[in-house]
Image (cartoon, grey):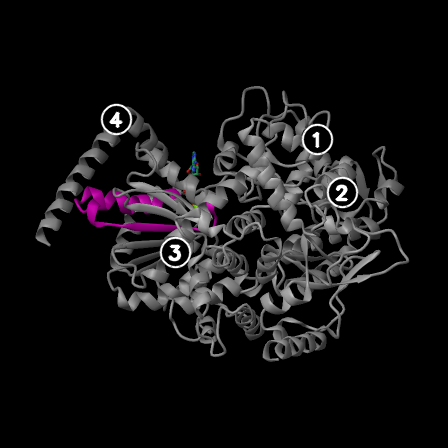
Amino acid sequence: RSVMEKVLQRKSLRMRNMQRTWMESPEGKKLLEFRKSLPSFKEKDRLLQAIAQNQVIVISGETGCGKTTQLPQYVLESEIESGRGAFCSIICTQPRRISAMTVAERVSTERGEPLGETVGYKVRLEGMRGKNTHLLFCTSGILLRRLLSDRNLNGITHVFVDEIHERGMNEDFLLIVLKDLLPRRRDLRLVLMSATLNADLFSNFYEGAPTIHIPGFTYPVKAHFLEDVLEMTGYKLSSFNQVDDYGQEKLWKTQKQLVPRKRKNLITTLVEDALNKATFETYSPRSRDSLASWVPDSIGFNLIEAVLCHICRKERPGAVLVFMTGWEDISCLRDQLKAHPLLGDPNRVLLLTCHGSMATSEQKLIFDRPPPNVRKRKGRAGRVQPGECYHLYPKCVYEAFAEYQLPELLRTPLNSLCLQIKSLQVGSIGEFLSSALQPPEPLAVQNAIGFLKMIGALDENENLTPLGKFLSMLPVDPKLGKMLIMGAVFHCFDPVLTIVSGLSVRDPFLLPQDKKDLAGTAKSRFSAKDYSDHMALVRAYEGWKDAEREGSAYEYCWRNFLSAQTLQAIHSLRKQFSFILRDAGLIDVDASNNNRLSHNQSLVRAIICSGLFPGIASVVHRETSMSFKTMGDGQNSVNARYQTIPYPWLVFGEKVKVNTVFIRDSTGVSDSILILFGGALHQGVQAGHLKILDGYVDFFMDPSLAECFLKLKEELNMLIEG
Ligand code: ADP
Ligand code: MG
């Protein structure tokens, strides 16, 4: 033990020397000057003292004041300076992957070290850290995962939980788990960081932990709202107030529905309503008729385009950040802007996209300086210079959002979370969640528990099943995790791995607005009459691998309307998933054994069913109508192209409600597959009219479905017994 101490002491001295050398170097001095200019620096001593004297403190300060990059760094520096560097281990959590990575990189730069030395990061399936890492930036999900195997966080000296004001689900979850841990680890220091002044809420949760506010600077940001934007871009609204009451009421209702995706629809609906309800005169060449015929999405897109033109015409140097609700919208908008004479001109505008599912290196492009001559939410602007923010919704909605913003824990499904609570062994799920800052509705908790029981992750008494234990080890949605495990167990791992990776990244099949038909035909070539979008994905991926070997990947993607970038992302995720499954002992090192049955189509179909259950729709053929509706711009299902489908059921991963309910990718399955690979059906099948496609193929959840299942089950039982 004392030998170990001596080693660490020697290492601490080395760390101190290195730190001093850097701080005295010209470059180090320059960065130190910058750091001293941040508002947090003035509070440094007070902060360090408070951390030393209290187990928990809550710190608030405006965006940009230096919380994330400076506070953990102050602790690290002071530990190193006092000769205890090698004894400290600091963790700072971030809600998002990209911030964990960029912040770690920034702090390394400020310390004059390569990333992965004293400062490192770890995010899902990716990381850079080493034996010298003493300050680790990670996502809150990673810290929760670590708590599964290390309930006391042994060896960790300081935990910073950042951005707690966002009330993300993982952060809220961490706050409960850490509160439970603190009495067991009296030496552990916990620092909560918030960008807003609501520190009291958190302080009260931790029995009156002291709060410190960093008074700060940020540059002024001028806010514009839809009212202003419509005027600026050529539309003049003469009576806008009509939307006020309506907006408030609708927003309030939607927030209560626990469905995050709905918010997007809400915004577009509000914009649409605003445009429809208000009487307005237009100064632009667009006529009112064409405006009225816009579908909601294009209203949003055209408005954004108009605003961007308005900004770019000012010819001021700088950057514009556009926030969209998901990858689908981001890529559609990018394609639309590329075709624009001003915005699509690469000599004048550098058009970049960033999304959590993109490769890290591509996401980081947005931080590079653009070449000369070219050229987020309010909180993003104003960090380094004054800015402007264009809210593309009415002011009344903005105010209502601020008022009714619900914590994530209260508005998202709790499936993964409940699984993690069980594996943390902290008692009953309901009891644990009732001790949250703002506990979720008991019904939402019951739904999640019901879902986990249904997929077989929990038993009747809410205990983890062996499947549940495996699922809690995999950093994916429990449904997809189940699909992976089933693929491994049934020796058809490869195709299943592709499907799960595809579902975790995004659809590689592109659907350009003006070439929808061609793109649809291209995709259906991969389906080979097996009535499965998931199998089409497997074929497309395998074809791409072949084409790559032959050096013709580019033409292959072009010809088949496939995104090379997405296929690449699927490829790397496949690798990462298979490493994890190998680590967990779920697949053999000998790949041929894992894929013994990969060629068996029915089996793969069955595994898809086992993963996507209870996403089932029954297929009903209607002879009369020949036309059909597809699901907006994102939908391109091979099953929408057939006259008839020789399967009684379709399993699907996602359903979307526009006017009726649509399903995205689907795979046809037989009765027997559904019975054998479905799950506990009586719980899964909720009777009701779920109309999926409004056309010659109608998929809907039949009210008598449950009954019909019971009959089939009986028949099967008789077969087995007889
Ligand atoms: P906070 O967490 O309080 O919002 P940060 O610690 O993230 O603040 O940032 C503090 C300041 O450091 C910012 O105002 C900005 O000037 C600078 N900064 C942060 N990240 C970077 C970066 N990657 N590159 C350059 N400067 C940065
Ligand atoms: Mg921050």
Question: The N terminus is located in which quarter?
Answer: bottom left
Label of residue 25 in the image: 4
What residue is shown with label 2?
A: 298
**Which span is picked out in magenta?**
69-97
> What is the crowding at mark 4: few (fewer than 14 residues within 10 Å), some, or many (at least 20)?
few
Compared with residue 649, is residue 301 higher up or lower down, i.e. above or below?
A: above
Q: In this view of the protein, which residue sits in the foreground, 424 or 59? A: 424
The quadrant holding residue 298 is top right
Label of residue 560 in the image: none
Q: In this view of the protein, which residue sits in the foreground, 365 or 498? A: 498
Amino acid type of the residue that numbered disc 4 sits on in the rendered structure: Ser
Q: Is residue 63 visible?
A: no
What residue is shown with label 1?
A: 309
Question: Which residue is at 34% across, 31% downward?
Answer: 31
Separation of residues labelled 2 and 1 (CA atoms): 16 Å
Secondary element under disc 1, as helix, strand or loop, is helix
- From this viewpoint, which residue is outermost toward the front? 722
Residue 43 screen position, x and y as percent: 33, 47
Question: The C terminus is located in which quarter?
Answer: bottom right
Separation of residues labelled 4 and 1 (CA atoms): 46 Å
- Nearer mark to the viewer, of 4 and 2: 2
Secondary element under disc 2, as helix, strand or loop, is helix
